[in-house]
Amino acid sequence: MQALQGLENPSSSVRLQAVMAIGTAPDPEYVDRLVERCSVEPDFYVRDMLTWAITRHAVAETVPRLVGELGSANPRARSQALHTLSKIGDRRAWPAITRELLTDPDDETARTAWRTAVALAPDEDVSVLTAVLVTQLGRGDRETRLSLSRALTGLGETIVPALTAAKTDPDPRVRHHALATERLLHDPDAGFEAAVEEAKRIVALGPDAPERPPAEDAGDGSGELQEWGDGSAGTGVVTDGADR
């Protein structure tokens, strides 16, 4: 019980050690408190350790409790439960990854839902998942768009027809995002920044424009995303980081 009390300690290092102790000696009685703590824990590293500790417990104890969190009004509770379900990898949780979660107004929750859905979706539901994910093209900031492209390309060639349709969308943000995602699918080494720049060029000049030669010192652009929106060239880049 001392470890459970440590979860409430003001010191993040004490909370971290408490979670490690619980994960080292798992007990079904700890599951509720671990899941509850996920929704309020402010420290990223402690939250990640909470996920680890939950995965140390039996799936029969953890998955139903985590699924229950997906309907929480607290975005952090939804997001952390999704993240933990992705780590557990039990496909029986798949029916709980609803369209509402995949289109969640909270970007962090939606991003985690996309990643979790790709990990859990059975082959027969990939087309349904793709149809929902493409409705999110053009959404949010650079990190959100990069997360969506990673999720879509994780589904493989099955996304091509949906991307082809999205490339004719009246919204230029959707067209740019669809083109960039398609390029990443076919050339993962291009990097997202290069894919976005190529997408903007194609939208501006048309699909028959000659291919731009690669810049000598451009690098592969891995993990970076150039801002786009109205078709003007952006200058800032951002590292996607942990995508959590």
Image (cartoon, rainbow, N blue to C red):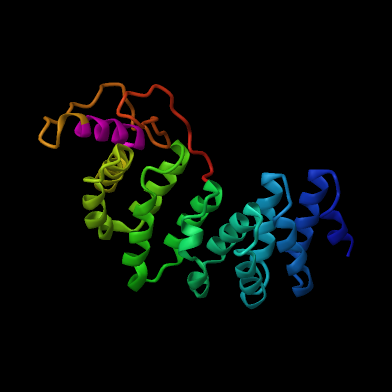
Tell me: 44 left or right of 185.
Answer: right
Asked if the magenta segment contains residue 194, the reply would be: yes
Q: Residue 235: x, y in percent?
A: 39, 21
Q: Identify the image quadrant of the N terminus.
A: bottom right
Image quadrant where residue 57 sits: bottom right
Q: Residue 6: x, y in percent?
A: 85, 54
* Residue at horizontal 46 percent and vertical 37 percent from the top: 141
Residue nearest the viewer, comparing 19 with 69: 69
The span picked out in magenta is 190-203
Residue 76 shows up from this direction = yes
Tell me: residue 158, above or below residue 234: below
Tell me: 35 left or right of 79.
Answer: right
* Residue at horizontal 73 percent and vertical 68 percent from the top: 31
Q: Residue 16: x, y in percent?
A: 76, 50
Image quadrant where residue 2 sits: bottom right
Asked if the magenta segment contains residue 183, the reply would be: no
Tell me: residue 141, above or below residue 166: above
Q: Residue 224: x, y in percent?
A: 42, 33
Q: Main secondary structure of the magenta part?
A: helix
Tell me: residue 212, above or below residue 156: above
* Residue at horizontal 29 percent and vertical 44 percent from the top: 184
Image quadrant where residue 155 sits: bottom left
